[in-house]
Image (cartoon, coloured by chain):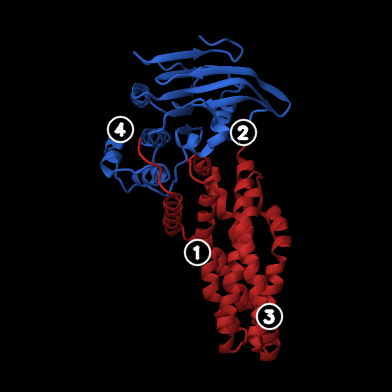
Amino acid sequence: MSSRPSALAAAVAVLERDLVLAARRPGEWLQPLGFFVLVTVLFPLALDPEPTRLRELAPAALWVSLLLASLLALEFLFREDARDGTLEQFALSGQSFTALLLAKTATHWILTGLPMVVAGPFAVLALGAPATAIPGVLLAVLLGSVTLSLIGAIGAGLTLGTRRGGALLSLLVLPLVMPVLVFGARATARAIAGDEMAEAILLLGSLGVLSLTLAPLAAAAAVRISME
Amino acid sequence: MLEVTQLHLWRGDRHLLKGLGFSLEPGQLLQLLWPNGTGKTSLLRCLAGFTHAEEGEIRWQGRPVREDRDEFHWQLAYLGHENSLKDDLSAPENLRFACALRTHLKEAQLRARLDMVGLGSIDPHLPVRNFSAGQKRRVALARLSLWNARLWLLDEPATNLDAAGQAVLASLLQEHLAAGGMAVVATHRPIDLPGAHSRYWHLPGDTLQ
C-alpha cells in the first residue's frame, strides 16, 4: 500500500484546486470586490465633496464596505463543496479536516480579501486621504481581512445545514467581527491623520493571531455537525 | 477486519438499528438488501464516522475506530448518493485532485482506470458538467479504485449505471475483493459476483448467514 501524502501536500492540493475552480468561474469572487469598490466610490458622490469631511468619514466608509463585502463573499466559502459531497470526502480523506478547511479559507482570502487589500489604499485616496496614509491602511486592511475570513469561516460552517443561510450568517458573524471594525477604522483614522498607529495595529494583529489559532478548529467542528 | 457489535442508532425519535452486529473478513462482500427506510444509508454513514452511534462499537483491525480515526478513514472509501465531483473540472482533473489527498498517483494508472470504466475515449479536457449521470458515476468508481482503500462503503453504487456500467462495477468489486479488500454495499438489487465471498442481508432484524 502506498504512503499517505503529508498534510501540507494535501492542503496545497486543495488550494490549487480552488484557484483553478475560481479561474473558471470568476463571477463569484469578483462580485464582492465590485461591491467594495462601488460603495467606496459612491460615498463621495452622495456626500458633500468637501475634502476635510470626506477624509473624516473615509475610515468608516472603508471598513463598513469591507465588512459587508467580506460577508457577501462568505456565502460561497463552503456551500458548493457541501452540496456536491466534496466536504464529506475531505472528512474521510484521512487528512486533518481542520487543515483542509483552513486551506479553503486561505484560498477564499486570496480571492476575496487580497484584492480588497490592494484596493483599500486606492479607496482611501479617492476619499481624500494623503498618500502618506497608504502603508498604514494597507497593513490595517491586510490584518483585518485575514481575521474577517477566519471568523467568517465559522459562520459559513454553522449555516451550511440551513437552506437560506445568508441572513443567519450575517447575524452570527457580525457581532464576532465588531472588534475588527472598531480597531480597523481606528487604525485607518490614525494613518490618515499621520498619528502613531502602533496600538491599533497591534490589537488588529492579536485579533488575527487569536482567530488563526481558534477559528479553524471551530469551523471544522461546525462543518462536521452539518454533515451528521 | 471490520467488527460491529451491539450497534444502536437513533434518527430523531426512531430507534433505527437495534443492537446490530456483524463482522467482515478480508475478501468478503456484505450486501445490505434491507427495504427502503430501514437504515441502510444510516448504517453506512455511521460506519464511515459521519454520525456516532448511541451505543455499540466499531472495530477495525481489532482496534476501536475512535482510537485512530484518520488512519481508519484513509483505509476506507465511501461512495454515497453524491458523486463528489466538481462540475467545472474534467474527469482527469477530478481524479488527480481526489487522489492528491490520499495517495501518490501515476498518470499511467489514471489513464488505465479511465479506460477500464469506459471513459478512455472522452476528451480529457471536457468538464464533468457535460457528462451524463451514468458517466459521472463511472468517474466516481474510477476514483474509488484508485484510492487503494481496504474497506469500501458503497451506497447504491449502481445508480444511473447502464448494463455495461454495472459490469464495470462488478469487475471493480471483484478485483478489490480478490486483493483482500472488504466491501459493504447497500443495494436494492443483489450484485452477482461469481467466485466472490458474498453475503446477503435481507432485513436488519435477521441474523446474518
**Cα separation between marks 3 and 1:** 31 Å
Give, as a three-letter code, the residue at label 4.
Gly
Viewer-nearest of discs 1 and 4: 1
Residue assigned mark 1:
A110
Q: Nearer the viewer, residue B160 or A116?
A: A116
C-beta proximity under 8 Å, tags 4 and 3: no
* First along the sequence among labels 3 and 1: 3
Chain where mark 1 sits: A
Q: Do the dots labelled 1 and 2 sit on one chain?
A: no
> For the residue carrying disc 3, how many other residues have a C-alpha within 10 Å: few (<14), some (14-19), or many (20+)?
few
Please give left or right for residue B11 compared with residue B31 in the image. right
Q: Which mark is residue B51?
A: 2
Residue B207 placement (x, y as % from top left): 57, 10
Q: Nearer the viewer, residue A137 or A77?
A: A137
Q: Is residue A60 visible?
A: no
Please give left or right for residue A212 compared with residue A1 in the image. right
Residue at figure coordinates x 56%, y 83% from the top left = A134
Residue B6 placement (x, y as % from top left): 63, 19
Give, as a three-letter code, the residue at label 2.
Thr
The chain coloured blue in the image: B
**Cα separation between marks 2 and 4:** 35 Å
Chain where mark 2 sits: B
Residue assigned mark 3:
A46
